[in-house]
Amino acid sequence: MRHRYILVFPLAVACSRSPSGRVSSDTSVSTGVLSEETVRTELTHAEDEWEDALKAHDAAFFERTMSDDFVGTTVEGISDKTSLVRVNADTSVTVDSVGRSDEKIRIYGNGTVGVITGRFAERGHIGSRHLGVEFRYTEVWVKRNGRWQVVAGHYTPVEQAKK
């Protein structure tokens, strides 16, 4: 998540995150209410898959995981699902490493809405040019038809301390 975009997303901006359909085994599903532990596990898994999809430029993952009405906000402006799927599919950017930290997951709506905040770092390169981003993020995930989708994200660059 997540969420999450993303060397490719922030670096692309600078140069110019369900777990995919997985059904929970939690028995509370039959009551329509998931335990917070189950929801946190599912959302953590979705964020892990997001990182893997970044490295693999897996456009199909982003296509199914981002809601059609997704809105991503950065200091550069607003982006939609179509543009972010395209950017994340761009293989001219090689993602070398990604990592999340300081992640917090809050659950709402009887386990159908998750708000994830954290810090994300990504390193990579375009040809011989090395790139890196680090930012704070907030993502809103909604469980629809048994799978998690990210509906909104806000990504703010972290200023690096001057040495």
Image (spheres, rainbow, N blue to C red):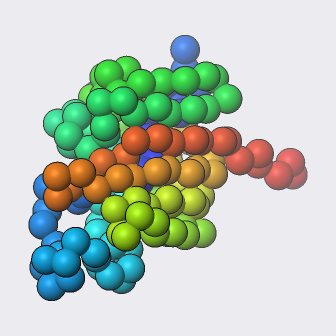
Residue 6 occupies quadrant: top left
Question: Residue 45, position in %: x, y?
Answer: 29, 66
Horizontally, residue 140 falls left or right of residue 111, namely right
Name above or below for residue 54 compared with residue 93: below
The residue at the far front in this view is 31
Q: Is residue 86 left or right of residue 61?
A: right
Q: Quadrant of residue 94?
A: top left
Q: Which residue is located at x 29 percent, y 69 percent?
A: 42
User: Hey, which residue is sitting farthest right in the picture?
Assistant: 163
96 versus 72 height, above or below: below
Extreme top residue here? 16
Instruction: Looking at the picture, tell me which residue is in the foreground, 67 or 44.
Output: 67
Q: Is residue 47 above or below residue 5?
A: below
Q: Position of residue 162 (x, y in %)?
A: 86, 48
Task: Please give the name of the residue rendered at 22% of the width and 34% of the height, measured from the top-left corner.
Answer: 63
Q: Is residue 154 something one can see in this rendering?
A: yes
Rendered view: 11 above or below 101: above
Q: Is residue 6 visible?
A: no
Residue 104 position, x and y percent, is 55, 69
x, y percent for residue 150: 37, 46
Which quadrant would residue 77 be assigned to in this image?
Answer: top right
**Residue at 46% in and 51% down:** 140
Q: How many marks?
A: 0
Residue visible at 46% across and 66% down in the picture = 108
Q: Is residue 134 left or right of residue 36?
A: right
